Image (tube, rainbow, N blue to C red):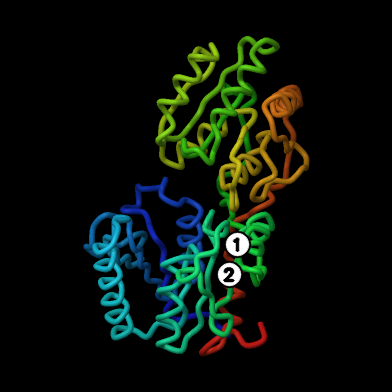
Amino acid sequence: MADGPHHLLLITPGFPAAEADTACIPALQLYVRALAQQQPGWRISLLPLHYPYRTTPYRWHGLEVLPCGGANRRQPWRWLAWLRAVQRLRALQRRQPITLIHSFWLGECSRLGEWWAGRLAIPHLLTLMGQEVCRRQPWLGRIDRRRSRVVALSAFQDEWFARSYGRHADQLIPWGVPEAEGRHSVTEPEIDLLGVGALSAVKEYALFLEVVAELLPAHPQLRCLLVGEGPQRPLLERRAEQLGISAAVTFAGGVPREQVIALMRRARVLLHPARFESFGLAMAEAQALGLGVVSRAVGIAAVGPGWELAEEPRAMAAAVGRLLARPAAEVAPRFPLAATVAAYRQLYGASGRSGWGGV
């Protein structure tokens, strides 16, 4: 398949419900749109199992999306989504034979993709996406090496995968940031410290608040913004009050991705305290825009110009203080979207009619 797949099927738990739904798995939709723009001769079909919560097919930037409406429900209702997925697969195959299946998340998507690829005798590619690598799934996590190739987003995620499954991914391909988003250009930033992410337990934004409390005595005019929505927001708002920092921290809620980028352009430092990231798109976006970044050693995080690693509040506060004091600096984006697309195109092209051979 040297020229790549003629009909590429992507299987994922969720996909944007509309073109304006830019907050839904932004790294994936950035990739899919860039791939479609570079390969207008390919047919790319998308099969989201659970989100959107509907079953009516629709178009997204010209691509066919066939939602199965699973809505993350338990059995027996989940079987209905799987049955609908099989019906969609059969209809797609009748209309134009599928030549390669690319599934996202190790679990029911990869299991469905591998099973259908086996029926059609075509190659299957799996991209690991998140915390599913942290715990072995006896049935859903089965991977047939004869047919499937596995891609990890970072060395950090790959190490977790190896611990759980006793093998490493076949290739590392990080997500990418569009070059067109450009560099940080604000000479007088309006936000000193920015946090971006879902307000969930794994993101540990309570630690963000503790860092703010550490910084305020030396930076009494500190301006902090926390962007994101999630189940922990009420707890975090109460914690900010307990720490006496409510006046310094604004909770912006969930916003579209383009607005996140606009806020990053007005900021100086991104603090990302998550205890687990498979990649960390917010960190990559901030780095590309020239912000200072402070994070734990998760995902793509690595010490470099304007990027510091720390594990606990006092060390994070010290790192933020150093980055706030630094002059603005030009940086080269580490994760260009063009490189992501090129790596996957090469991998697609390396597949044979029924598998990956010696790749």
* Residue at (66% x, 70% y) in the render: 167
Quarter of the image with the C terminus in it: bottom right
* Residue at (49% x, 20% y) in the render: 239
Q: Amino acid at mark 2?
A: Tyr
Direction from residue 64 to residue 126 in the image, left or right: right
* Observer-nearest of 140 and 270: 140
* Residue 13: image location, x then y, percent: 39, 60
Q: Is residue 252 above or below residue 221?
A: below
Question: How many numbered marks appear?
Answer: 2
* Observer-nearest of 61 and 307: 307
Q: Is residue 192 above or below residue 301?
A: above
Q: Residue 185 appears in which quarter of the rendering?
A: top right
Q: Which residue is mark 1?
A: 340
* Residue at (61% x, 67% y) in the render: 165
Q: Is residue 354 above or below residue 341?
A: below
Tags 1 and 2 touching, CB below 8 Å: yes
Direction from residue 72 to residue 106 in the image, left or right: right
Q: Which numbered marker is on residue 344?
A: 2
